[in-house]
């Protein structure tokens, strides 16, 4: 018999969780104006809001925290991180930033101007926010298969080369500062991009003289999927695959709160000295001096260690295996989920669970609220609230899918927690016909409204 995987770590410190009553949760979510971001963490039993900055650091990372060098300039912790970025990613230059969106701010300040077009696979919300804030446009060139949740495709994060080339053909070169490949593609369901697609996108961009950038938050999870699903890489090590992925791009923004398994941190890495000089100015302006970039020395050191741990095969196998386990349980209850299960999260197709609720009443938000009421489980809406309004018409933008994302923090929960979450959704699925009303917005911000939106029941 082939042995199953088991977590390649044991638990040394535990943090107690408290279960609450349905009455308590009814009161709390109303006080939170039906916005799950407004809940206090004590009001949540299992928190699958995000896998960002919520991971458990290893004792090696904690010991790096103690070794952190807090010098303003030339910190030893900076050089530890530099060595890992140079050797693991093959990127000669980098600036640290306090998180991923800060990396976007630094890089885009140097590269994107008003009226520009930025094609890529479904851009992450902060990425799109930083593009639109500069009065530029993010053009989604993801393959059509990505929006058919029940269709199996091994690489639903892939870019459609025809869509991409159309953008290149129909617009002047100087209006396209870059093409962004998000690995894995968060917005399309934590779905990976194949090495073949990375290679082809990179070649096409080269032909048109357009730089290719990774939004690299989950690059290691993407590498694991390449190893699993792309035959010629089955015998490659994760670190070899990672290196080859980066070899195809000119620069990368990183949210280290994901695959570097730290609670805060990020960076921009690049190949070109001229670009490095440009982003250095913005790093100093927005983040801090070049050898700390808005972080403490100890954070840089923990990030260096986390980048290394995040690329280990047995860790990735158990991490992605746990997410797949949650997906498998949900499917056993008959709940429609994005196929195949993504690397960091299961995406429940709320449009198919609650088709009788009008989209103007926010199907995915309605399901996310039900899940909280059922068991104190916090997921997040990836649907119309997140899609925001069209910047010109101010009308709601209706995305292809109404999803509830259950993002699994790294090394934090056990499979019993996953079983609890699945059972909660199983109960809701059974009584789905009795859920007949959604929500209306009472207050919203002009950009990235989902974080602060206030709602009431219809
Ligand atoms: C999280 C994330 C970001 C933004 O990073 P923060 O650290 O949250 O600022 C950007 N892109 C992707 C794909 C992400 O998942």
Image (cartoon, rainbow, N blue to C red):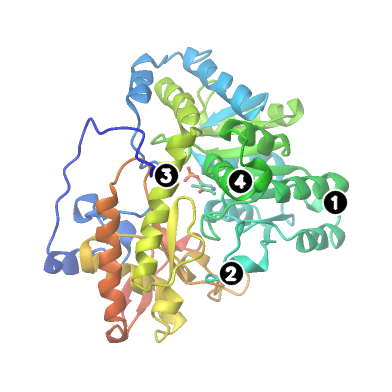
**Nearer mark to the viewer, of 1 and 4:** 4
Which residue is under mark 1? 173
Ligand 1 is within 8 Å of the C-beta of the residue at disc 2 = no
Q: Residue at x 44, y 47 (%)?
A: 320
Which residue is under mark 3? 2
Mark 1 vs 4: CB contact within 8 A: no
Q: Residue at x 67, y 36 (%)?
A: 246
Query: Does the rendering let one see residue 143?
Result: yes
The answer for how far apart the CA atoms under marks 4 and 3 are is 22 Å
**Nearer mark to the viewer, of 1 and 2:** 2
User: Which circle's residue, 1 or 2, is located before the other in the chain?
Assistant: 2
Q: Residue at x 57, y 21 (%)?
A: 82
**Disc 2, SS:** helix
Mark 3 vs 2: CB contact within 8 A: no
- Asked if 123 appears above or below 177 in the picture, the reply is below
User: Which circle's residue, 1 or 3, is located before the other in the chain?
Assistant: 3
From the image, which quarter does the N terminus lie in?
top left
Q: Position of residue 391 (x, y in %)?
A: 60, 67
**Nearer mark to the viewer, of 3 and 2:** 3
Which residue is under mark 2? 147
Q: Position of residue 69 (x, y in %)?
A: 42, 14
**Nearer mark to the viewer, of 2 and 4:** 4
Packing grade of label 4 (10 A; few <14, some 14-19, many >=20) is many
């Amino acid at each position: 018999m082939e042995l199953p995987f088991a977590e390649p770590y044991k638990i040394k410190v535990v943090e107690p969780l408290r279960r609450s009553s349905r009455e308590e949760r009814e009161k709390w979510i109303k006080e939170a104006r039906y916005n799950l971001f407004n809940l206090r963490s004590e009001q949540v039993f299992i928190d699958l809001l995000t896998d960002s900055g919520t991971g458990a650091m290893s004792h090696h990372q904690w010991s790096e925290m103690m070794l952190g060098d807090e010098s303003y300039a030339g910190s030893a912790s900076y050089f530890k991180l530099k060595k890992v970025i140079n050797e693991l990613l093959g990127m000669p230059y980098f600036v640290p930033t306090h998180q991923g969106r800060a990396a976007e701010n630094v890089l885009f300040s140097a590269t994107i101007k008003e009226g520009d077009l930025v094609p890529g696979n479904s851009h992450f919300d902060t990425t799109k926010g930083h593009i639109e804030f500069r009065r530029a446009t993010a053009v989604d060139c993801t393959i059509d298969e990505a929006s058919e949740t029940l269709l199996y495709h091994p690489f639903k994060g892939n870019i459609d080369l025809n869509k991409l080339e159309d953008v290149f053909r129909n617009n002047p070169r100087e209006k396209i500062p870059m093409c962004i490949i998000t690995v894995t593609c968060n917005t399309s369901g934590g779905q990976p991009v194949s090495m073949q697609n990375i290679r082809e996108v990179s070649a096409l961009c080269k032909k048109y003289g357009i730089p290719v950038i990774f939004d690299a938050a989950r690059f290691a999870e993407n590498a694991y999927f390449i190893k699993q699903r792309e035959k010629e890489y089955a015998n490659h090590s994760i670190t070899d695959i990672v290196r080859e992925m980066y070899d195809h791009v000119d620069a990368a923004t990183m949210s280290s709160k994901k695959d570097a398994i730290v609670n805060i941190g990020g960076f921009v890495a690049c190949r070109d000295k001229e670009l490095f000089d440009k982003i250095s100015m913005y790093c100093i302006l927005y983040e801090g001096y070049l050898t700390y970039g808005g972080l403490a020395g100890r954070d840089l050191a923990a990030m260096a260690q986390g980048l290394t741990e995040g690329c280990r095969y047995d860790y990735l196998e158990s991490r992605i295996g746990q997410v797949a386990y949650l997906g498998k349980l949900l499917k056993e209850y008959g709940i429609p989920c994005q196929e195949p299960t993504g690397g960091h999260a299961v995406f429940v197709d709320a449009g198919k669970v609650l088709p009788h609720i009008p989209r103007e009443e926010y199907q995915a938000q309605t399901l996310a609220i039900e899940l909280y009421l059922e068991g104190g489980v916090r997921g997040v809406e990836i649907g119309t609230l997140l899609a925001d309004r069209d910047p010109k018409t101010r009308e709601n933008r209706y995305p292809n899918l109404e999803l509830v994302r259950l993002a699994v923090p790294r090394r934090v929960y056990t499979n019993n927690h996953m079983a609890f979450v699945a059972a909660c959704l199983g109960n809701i699925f059974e009584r789905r016909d009795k859920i007949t009303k959604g929500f209306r917005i009472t207050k919203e911000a002009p950009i990235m409204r989902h974080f602060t939106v206030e709602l009431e029941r219809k």
